[in-house]
Image (cartoon, grey):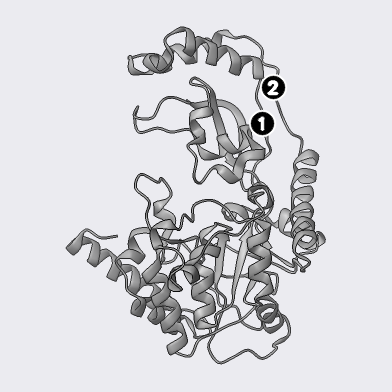
Amino acid sequence: MYHNVGRDYPGWPWNFLVTPLDVFEGHMRILKERGWTTITLDELHAHVERGASVPEKPIVLTFDDGYRDNYVHAFPILKKYGHRAVIWMSTDFVDPRADCPPTLEDVWAGRVSMDELDARGYLSWAEMRRMVASGLVDIQSHAKTHTWYFSGPEIADFHRPDGVDGYRAPLWLVWNNFPGEKYKSMHERMENRIPYGEPIYRSGKSFAVRRYFEDPKLTSRLVAFAAEEGGAEFFSRGGWRERLEAVAREYGPRADRIETQEEYLARVRAELVESRETIEAALGTKVRYLCWPGGAHGEEVRTMAGEAGYLATTTLFEDPVKKNIFGEDPRDINRIGSGSPWTWRGKIIKNTGPEFFVTAFDLFAGKRFSIWKYRCYKLLYALRYCITGDR
Protein backbone atom coordinates (compact mmCIF):
# COMPACT_ATOMS: atom_id res chain seq x y z
CA MET A 1 0.00 0.00 0.00
CA TYR A 2 1.41 3.37 -1.08
CA HIS A 3 0.20 6.94 -0.79
CA ASN A 4 2.47 9.61 -2.31
CA VAL A 5 5.51 8.89 -4.45
CA GLY A 6 8.12 11.56 -5.10
CA ARG A 7 10.20 13.98 -3.11
CA ASP A 8 9.91 16.07 0.03
CA TYR A 9 8.89 19.71 -0.36
CA PRO A 10 10.34 22.17 2.17
CA GLY A 11 7.76 22.89 4.85
CA TRP A 12 5.13 20.68 3.23
CA PRO A 13 3.13 19.03 6.05
CA TRP A 14 2.46 15.86 4.02
CA ASN A 15 6.04 14.77 3.50
CA PHE A 16 5.48 11.92 5.94
CA LEU A 17 3.22 10.23 3.37
CA VAL A 18 5.88 10.23 0.65
CA THR A 19 7.77 7.17 -0.53
CA PRO A 20 10.95 8.61 -2.08
CA LEU A 21 11.16 8.27 -5.83
CA ASP A 22 14.37 6.25 -5.85
CA VAL A 23 13.01 3.88 -3.21
CA PHE A 24 9.79 3.37 -5.16
CA GLU A 25 11.68 2.65 -8.38
CA GLY A 26 13.87 0.23 -6.45
CA HIS A 27 10.76 -1.61 -5.32
CA MET A 28 9.41 -1.85 -8.86
CA ARG A 29 12.75 -2.93 -10.33
CA ILE A 30 13.39 -5.66 -7.78
CA LEU A 31 9.83 -6.97 -7.98
CA LYS A 32 10.46 -7.40 -11.69
CA GLU A 33 13.86 -9.02 -11.16
CA ARG A 34 12.53 -11.41 -8.50
CA GLY A 35 9.72 -12.66 -10.72
CA TRP A 36 6.72 -11.00 -9.07
CA THR A 37 3.70 -10.42 -11.33
CA THR A 38 1.27 -7.59 -10.67
CA ILE A 39 -2.33 -8.70 -11.04
CA THR A 40 -5.70 -6.94 -11.01
CA LEU A 41 -8.28 -6.97 -8.25
CA ASP A 42 -10.58 -8.92 -10.58
CA GLU A 43 -7.92 -11.63 -10.88
CA LEU A 44 -7.38 -11.59 -7.13
CA HIS A 45 -11.09 -11.85 -6.40
CA ALA A 46 -11.55 -14.72 -8.85
CA HIS A 47 -8.72 -16.58 -7.14
CA VAL A 48 -10.07 -16.08 -3.61
CA GLU A 49 -13.69 -16.77 -4.57
CA ARG A 50 -13.32 -19.83 -6.81
CA GLY A 51 -9.65 -20.75 -6.91
CA ALA A 52 -8.91 -19.29 -10.36
CA SER A 53 -5.25 -19.60 -11.28
CA VAL A 54 -2.81 -16.73 -10.70
CA PRO A 55 0.91 -16.40 -11.48
CA GLU A 56 3.37 -18.09 -9.15
CA LYS A 57 4.28 -14.86 -7.33
CA PRO A 58 1.28 -12.51 -7.64
CA ILE A 59 1.01 -9.08 -6.08
CA VAL A 60 -1.51 -6.24 -6.17
CA LEU A 61 -0.04 -2.74 -5.92
CA THR A 62 -2.41 -0.14 -4.44
CA PHE A 63 -2.25 3.62 -3.93
CA ASP A 64 -4.58 5.28 -1.42
CA ASP A 65 -6.34 8.64 -1.89
CA GLY A 66 -5.56 9.51 -5.53
CA TYR A 67 -2.69 11.96 -5.26
CA ARG A 68 -1.39 13.84 -8.28
CA ASP A 69 2.08 12.32 -7.93
CA ASN A 70 0.59 8.92 -8.72
CA TYR A 71 0.33 10.23 -12.29
CA VAL A 72 3.43 12.47 -12.37
CA HIS A 73 5.89 10.11 -10.65
CA ALA A 74 4.51 6.61 -10.11
CA PHE A 75 2.76 6.00 -13.44
CA PRO A 76 5.89 6.42 -15.61
CA ILE A 77 7.79 3.99 -13.38
CA LEU A 78 4.94 1.49 -13.52
CA LYS A 79 5.10 1.69 -17.32
CA LYS A 80 8.88 1.35 -17.29
CA TYR A 81 8.68 -2.00 -15.48
CA GLY A 82 5.35 -3.18 -16.87
CA HIS A 83 3.58 -3.23 -13.50
CA ARG A 84 -0.13 -2.77 -12.95
CA ALA A 85 -1.69 -0.94 -10.02
CA VAL A 86 -4.93 0.17 -8.38
CA ILE A 87 -5.62 3.73 -7.26
CA TRP A 88 -8.32 4.21 -4.65
CA MET A 89 -9.99 7.56 -5.45
CA SER A 90 -12.24 9.63 -3.17
CA THR A 91 -14.47 11.48 -5.61
CA ASP A 92 -14.82 14.69 -3.57
CA PHE A 93 -11.10 15.31 -4.13
CA VAL A 94 -10.89 15.08 -7.92
CA ASP A 95 -9.15 18.17 -9.33
CA PRO A 96 -11.36 19.90 -11.95
CA ARG A 97 -8.50 20.95 -14.25
CA ALA A 98 -8.65 19.60 -17.80
CA ASP A 99 -4.93 19.46 -18.62
CA CYS A 100 -2.34 16.81 -17.82
CA PRO A 101 0.93 18.10 -16.32
CA PRO A 102 4.42 16.96 -17.36
CA THR A 103 5.63 13.70 -15.85
CA LEU A 104 8.86 11.84 -15.26
CA GLU A 105 8.72 10.73 -18.88
CA ASP A 106 9.13 14.38 -19.91
CA VAL A 107 12.13 14.63 -17.60
CA TRP A 108 13.67 11.49 -19.09
CA ALA A 109 13.14 12.92 -22.59
CA GLY A 110 14.75 16.24 -21.65
CA ARG A 111 11.60 18.30 -22.19
CA VAL A 112 11.47 19.58 -18.59
CA SER A 113 13.70 19.46 -15.55
CA MET A 114 12.93 17.56 -12.36
CA ASP A 115 12.53 20.86 -10.51
CA GLU A 116 9.75 21.86 -12.90
CA LEU A 117 7.55 18.96 -11.79
CA ASP A 118 5.12 19.92 -9.03
CA ALA A 119 3.18 16.82 -8.11
CA ARG A 120 1.30 18.15 -5.08
CA GLY A 121 -2.47 17.85 -5.12
CA TYR A 122 -5.00 15.31 -6.32
CA LEU A 123 -5.69 13.59 -9.62
CA SER A 124 -7.93 15.00 -12.34
CA TRP A 125 -10.27 12.94 -14.50
CA ALA A 126 -8.00 13.69 -17.48
CA GLU A 127 -5.00 12.12 -15.71
CA MET A 128 -7.04 9.14 -14.59
CA ARG A 129 -8.37 8.56 -18.12
CA ARG A 130 -4.84 8.57 -19.50
CA MET A 131 -3.67 6.02 -16.93
CA VAL A 132 -6.72 3.79 -17.43
CA ALA A 133 -6.21 3.88 -21.21
CA SER A 134 -2.73 2.41 -20.72
CA GLY A 135 -4.22 -0.78 -19.32
CA LEU A 136 -1.88 -0.58 -16.34
CA VAL A 137 -3.94 1.41 -13.85
CA ASP A 138 -7.37 0.69 -12.43
CA ILE A 139 -9.35 3.32 -10.51
CA GLN A 140 -11.53 2.00 -7.71
CA SER A 141 -13.54 3.66 -4.95
CA HIS A 142 -12.20 5.21 -1.77
CA ALA A 143 -15.76 6.46 -1.09
CA LYS A 144 -16.75 10.08 -1.58
CA THR A 145 -15.93 12.33 1.37
CA HIS A 146 -12.99 10.58 3.15
CA THR A 147 -13.53 12.81 6.17
CA TRP A 148 -14.20 12.91 9.90
CA TYR A 149 -17.32 14.33 11.51
CA PHE A 150 -18.19 15.74 14.89
CA SER A 151 -19.75 12.92 16.88
CA GLY A 152 -20.85 14.54 20.15
CA PRO A 153 -21.42 17.83 21.99
CA GLU A 154 -18.20 17.77 24.03
CA ILE A 155 -15.79 20.47 22.90
CA ALA A 156 -12.35 18.88 22.55
CA ASP A 157 -10.46 21.99 21.43
CA PHE A 158 -10.60 25.33 19.62
CA HIS A 159 -8.95 26.43 16.40
CA ARG A 160 -6.06 28.75 17.13
CA PRO A 161 -2.95 30.11 15.37
CA ASP A 162 -0.04 27.96 14.31
CA GLY A 163 2.80 27.94 16.77
CA VAL A 164 0.65 27.63 19.89
CA ASP A 165 1.30 24.12 21.18
CA GLY A 166 2.10 23.24 17.56
CA TYR A 167 -1.62 23.09 16.88
CA ARG A 168 -3.29 23.39 13.50
CA ALA A 169 -6.90 22.97 12.49
CA PRO A 170 -7.65 19.34 11.58
CA LEU A 171 -7.61 19.03 7.81
CA TRP A 172 -11.02 17.44 7.83
CA LEU A 173 -12.46 20.57 9.45
CA VAL A 174 -11.24 22.47 6.39
CA TRP A 175 -12.74 19.83 4.10
CA ASN A 176 -16.12 20.02 5.83
CA ASN A 177 -16.19 23.83 5.80
CA PHE A 178 -15.11 24.09 2.14
CA PRO A 179 -16.27 20.84 0.50
CA GLY A 180 -16.00 22.20 -3.04
CA GLU A 181 -12.31 22.99 -2.57
CA LYS A 182 -11.04 19.77 -1.02
CA TYR A 183 -8.77 19.13 -4.01
CA LYS A 184 -6.71 22.20 -3.04
CA SER A 185 -5.94 21.00 0.45
CA MET A 186 -2.65 19.25 -0.38
CA HIS A 187 -0.97 22.37 -1.75
CA GLU A 188 -2.75 25.31 -0.08
CA ARG A 189 -2.74 26.29 3.61
CA MET A 190 -6.52 26.27 3.80
CA GLU A 191 -6.62 25.91 7.59
CA ASN A 192 -5.87 29.62 7.76
CA ARG A 193 -9.41 30.19 6.52
CA ILE A 194 -10.90 28.69 9.69
CA PRO A 195 -11.65 31.53 12.15
CA TYR A 196 -9.87 31.47 15.48
CA GLY A 197 -12.01 30.23 18.31
CA GLU A 198 -14.08 27.84 16.20
CA PRO A 199 -14.92 24.87 18.45
CA ILE A 200 -13.72 21.38 17.57
CA TYR A 201 -16.07 18.81 19.04
CA ARG A 202 -15.49 15.14 19.78
CA SER A 203 -15.17 13.49 16.39
CA GLY A 204 -14.62 10.26 14.49
CA LYS A 205 -14.24 8.81 11.02
CA SER A 206 -17.31 9.52 8.94
CA PHE A 207 -18.26 5.89 8.32
CA ALA A 208 -17.85 4.99 11.99
CA VAL A 209 -19.92 7.66 13.76
CA ARG A 210 -23.33 9.25 13.71
CA ARG A 211 -22.79 12.88 12.81
CA TYR A 212 -23.22 15.64 15.37
CA PHE A 213 -24.56 18.93 14.04
CA GLU A 214 -23.41 21.76 16.29
CA ASP A 215 -25.34 24.94 17.05
CA PRO A 216 -24.01 27.48 14.48
CA LYS A 217 -24.93 30.38 16.76
CA LEU A 218 -22.69 29.02 19.52
CA THR A 219 -19.86 28.70 17.01
CA SER A 220 -20.40 32.31 15.93
CA ARG A 221 -20.42 33.45 19.55
CA LEU A 222 -17.11 31.73 20.33
CA VAL A 223 -15.47 33.08 17.17
CA ALA A 224 -16.72 36.59 17.94
CA PHE A 225 -15.43 36.37 21.50
CA ALA A 226 -11.96 35.34 20.30
CA ALA A 227 -11.94 38.24 17.84
CA GLU A 228 -13.08 40.72 20.49
CA GLU A 229 -10.28 39.56 22.79
CA GLY A 230 -7.59 40.23 20.21
CA GLY A 231 -7.76 37.39 17.70
CA ALA A 232 -4.40 35.66 17.36
CA GLU A 233 -2.99 37.60 20.31
CA PHE A 234 -5.74 36.26 22.58
CA PHE A 235 -4.26 32.75 22.26
CA SER A 236 -0.81 33.90 23.35
CA ARG A 237 -2.16 34.83 26.78
CA GLY A 238 -2.81 32.39 29.59
CA GLY A 239 -6.34 31.26 30.40
CA TRP A 240 -7.75 31.53 26.89
CA ARG A 241 -9.12 27.98 26.96
CA GLU A 242 -10.92 28.44 30.27
CA ARG A 243 -12.50 31.69 29.04
CA LEU A 244 -13.78 30.09 25.82
CA GLU A 245 -15.12 27.12 27.75
CA ALA A 246 -16.92 29.53 30.10
CA VAL A 247 -18.56 31.23 27.09
CA ALA A 248 -19.77 27.82 25.89
CA ARG A 249 -21.15 26.89 29.33
CA GLU A 250 -22.96 30.20 29.70
CA TYR A 251 -24.48 30.05 26.23
CA GLY A 252 -27.55 28.17 27.36
CA PRO A 253 -29.57 25.51 25.50
CA ARG A 254 -28.06 24.57 22.16
CA ALA A 255 -29.90 24.08 18.89
CA ASP A 256 -27.83 20.99 18.09
CA ARG A 257 -28.60 17.38 17.27
CA ILE A 258 -27.10 13.98 16.36
CA GLU A 259 -28.28 12.22 13.21
CA THR A 260 -30.50 9.21 13.76
CA GLN A 261 -29.35 5.67 13.00
CA GLU A 262 -31.57 5.73 9.92
CA GLU A 263 -29.97 8.99 8.72
CA TYR A 264 -26.49 7.60 9.35
CA LEU A 265 -27.14 4.45 7.31
CA ALA A 266 -28.77 6.44 4.51
CA ARG A 267 -25.75 8.80 4.39
CA VAL A 268 -23.25 5.95 4.18
CA ARG A 269 -25.32 4.11 1.58
CA ALA A 270 -25.64 7.22 -0.59
CA GLU A 271 -21.89 7.86 -0.40
CA LEU A 272 -21.03 4.30 -1.40
CA VAL A 273 -23.36 4.38 -4.39
CA GLU A 274 -22.46 7.90 -5.53
CA SER A 275 -18.70 7.35 -5.50
CA ARG A 276 -19.01 4.16 -7.55
CA GLU A 277 -21.40 5.70 -10.08
CA THR A 278 -19.31 8.88 -10.41
CA ILE A 279 -16.11 7.00 -11.25
CA GLU A 280 -17.88 4.67 -13.67
CA ALA A 281 -19.52 7.58 -15.50
CA ALA A 282 -16.31 9.62 -15.72
CA LEU A 283 -13.99 6.82 -16.81
CA GLY A 284 -16.28 4.34 -18.54
CA THR A 285 -15.00 1.52 -16.33
CA LYS A 286 -16.46 -0.82 -13.73
CA VAL A 287 -16.01 -0.08 -10.04
CA ARG A 288 -16.32 -3.29 -8.02
CA TYR A 289 -13.98 -2.70 -5.08
CA LEU A 290 -13.87 -0.31 -2.14
CA CYS A 291 -11.11 0.87 0.18
CA TRP A 292 -12.62 2.09 3.44
CA PRO A 293 -11.55 5.68 4.23
CA GLY A 294 -9.29 5.50 7.25
CA GLY A 295 -10.14 1.81 7.50
CA ALA A 296 -13.37 2.62 9.38
CA HIS A 297 -16.20 0.15 8.86
CA GLY A 298 -18.41 -2.33 10.63
CA GLU A 299 -20.39 -5.39 9.63
CA GLU A 300 -23.51 -3.34 8.90
CA VAL A 301 -21.80 -0.95 6.47
CA ARG A 302 -19.78 -3.84 5.02
CA THR A 303 -23.08 -5.49 4.11
CA MET A 304 -24.26 -2.21 2.60
CA ALA A 305 -21.16 -2.11 0.41
CA GLY A 306 -22.18 -5.45 -1.09
CA GLU A 307 -25.69 -4.14 -1.66
CA ALA A 308 -24.20 -1.04 -3.34
CA GLY A 309 -22.43 -3.18 -5.93
CA TYR A 310 -18.97 -3.83 -4.45
CA LEU A 311 -17.57 -7.36 -4.67
CA ALA A 312 -14.95 -6.82 -1.98
CA THR A 313 -13.58 -4.21 0.42
CA THR A 314 -10.27 -3.68 2.21
CA THR A 315 -9.65 -4.92 5.74
CA LEU A 316 -7.53 -3.66 8.58
CA PHE A 317 -4.12 -5.16 9.36
CA GLU A 318 -4.40 -8.32 11.44
CA ASP A 319 -1.99 -10.33 13.57
CA PRO A 320 -1.15 -12.80 12.08
CA VAL A 321 -1.45 -11.28 8.62
CA LYS A 322 -4.16 -12.91 6.53
CA LYS A 323 -3.34 -14.01 3.02
CA ASN A 324 -5.59 -13.53 -0.01
CA ILE A 325 -6.07 -17.20 -0.90
CA PHE A 326 -8.83 -19.52 -2.00
CA GLY A 327 -10.95 -20.40 1.00
CA GLU A 328 -10.78 -16.99 2.69
CA ASP A 329 -13.78 -14.64 2.56
CA PRO A 330 -13.86 -13.26 -1.02
CA ARG A 331 -15.43 -10.03 0.30
CA ASP A 332 -12.11 -9.16 1.98
CA ILE A 333 -8.99 -7.60 0.46
CA ASN A 334 -6.17 -8.10 2.96
CA ARG A 335 -3.29 -5.66 2.53
CA ILE A 336 0.16 -5.02 3.91
CA GLY A 337 -0.29 -1.49 5.15
CA SER A 338 0.83 1.12 7.61
CA GLY A 339 0.13 -1.16 10.57
CA SER A 340 2.50 -3.91 9.43
CA PRO A 341 6.04 -4.30 10.80
CA TRP A 342 7.58 -3.49 7.38
CA THR A 343 5.49 -0.42 6.57
CA TRP A 344 6.92 1.48 3.61
CA ARG A 345 5.74 4.92 4.64
CA GLY A 346 7.64 7.74 6.25
CA LYS A 347 10.90 7.16 8.11
CA ILE A 348 10.89 3.39 7.99
CA ILE A 349 10.99 3.12 4.23
CA LYS A 350 13.52 5.93 3.98
CA ASN A 351 15.83 3.81 6.12
CA THR A 352 14.87 0.48 4.60
CA GLY A 353 16.18 -0.56 1.21
CA PRO A 354 14.32 -2.36 -1.55
CA GLU A 355 15.96 -5.66 -0.62
CA PHE A 356 14.10 -5.70 2.70
CA PHE A 357 10.86 -4.79 0.92
CA VAL A 358 11.09 -7.81 -1.35
CA THR A 359 12.24 -10.10 1.45
CA ALA A 360 9.03 -9.20 3.27
CA PHE A 361 7.01 -10.19 0.22
CA ASP A 362 8.96 -13.42 -0.21
CA LEU A 363 8.18 -14.36 3.39
CA PHE A 364 4.57 -13.30 2.91
CA ALA A 365 4.17 -15.64 -0.07
CA GLY A 366 3.30 -18.61 2.14
CA LYS A 367 -0.26 -19.62 2.98
CA ARG A 368 -0.26 -17.45 6.07
CA PHE A 369 2.48 -15.21 7.44
CA SER A 370 3.49 -17.03 10.61
CA ILE A 371 3.29 -15.29 13.95
CA TRP A 372 6.91 -16.07 14.86
CA LYS A 373 8.19 -14.33 11.73
CA TYR A 374 5.96 -11.35 12.51
CA ARG A 375 7.36 -11.14 16.04
CA CYS A 376 10.93 -11.51 14.79
CA TYR A 377 10.49 -8.54 12.48
CA LYS A 378 9.00 -6.46 15.29
CA LEU A 379 12.00 -7.40 17.45
CA LEU A 380 14.43 -6.45 14.67
CA TYR A 381 12.81 -3.03 14.36
CA ALA A 382 12.95 -2.54 18.13
CA LEU A 383 16.64 -3.45 18.18
CA ARG A 384 17.40 -1.12 15.28
CA TYR A 385 15.62 1.73 17.04
CA CYS A 386 17.61 1.12 20.24
CA ILE A 387 20.90 1.14 18.29
CA THR A 388 20.34 3.83 15.66
CA GLY A 389 17.29 5.82 16.80
CA ASP A 390 15.66 5.21 13.40
CA ARG A 391 12.06 4.01 13.43
State the residue position of label 2.
Answer: 256
Q: CA distance from mark 2 to mark 1?
A: 8 Å
Q: Earlier in the sequence, mark 2 or mark 1?
A: 1
Q: Secondary structure at mark 2?
A: loop
Left or right of residue 36: residue 49? right
Q: Secondary structure at mark 1?
A: strand
How crowded is the residue under tag 2: few (<14 C-alpha within 10 Å), some, or many (20+)? Answer: some
On screen, residue 353 above or below 92:
below
On screen, residue 326 above or below 63:
below
Q: Residue at x 58, y 41 (%)?
A: 204
Left or right of residue 230: residue 182? right
Q: Is residue 80 visible?
A: yes
Front-most of residues 222 and 26: 26
Front-most of residues 96 and 331: 96
On screen, residue 284 above or below 183:
below
Q: Residue at x 71, y 59 (%)?
A: 302
Is mark 2 in CB contact (under 8 Å) with mark 1? yes
Residue 368 is situated, as x and y percent measured from the top left of the image, at: 51, 80
Residue 307 is situated, as x and y percent measured from the top left of the image, at: 82, 60
Residue 85 is situated, as x and y percent measured from the top left of the image, at: 58, 73
Amino acid type of the residue tagged 1 in the rendering? Tyr
Residue 391 - label: none
Is the C terminus in the top left, top right, bottom left or bottom right quadrant? bottom left
Q: Residue at x 77, y 56 (%)?
A: 304
Q: Residue furthest front?
A: 111
Amino acid type of the residue tagged 2 in the rendering? Asp
State the residue position of label 1.
Answer: 212
Residue 40, quarter of picture: bottom right
How crowded is the residue under tag 1: few (<14 C-alpha within 10 Å), some, or many (20+)? Answer: some
Residue 362, quarter of picture: bottom left
Residue 205 is situated, as x and y percent measured from the top left of the image, at: 60, 45
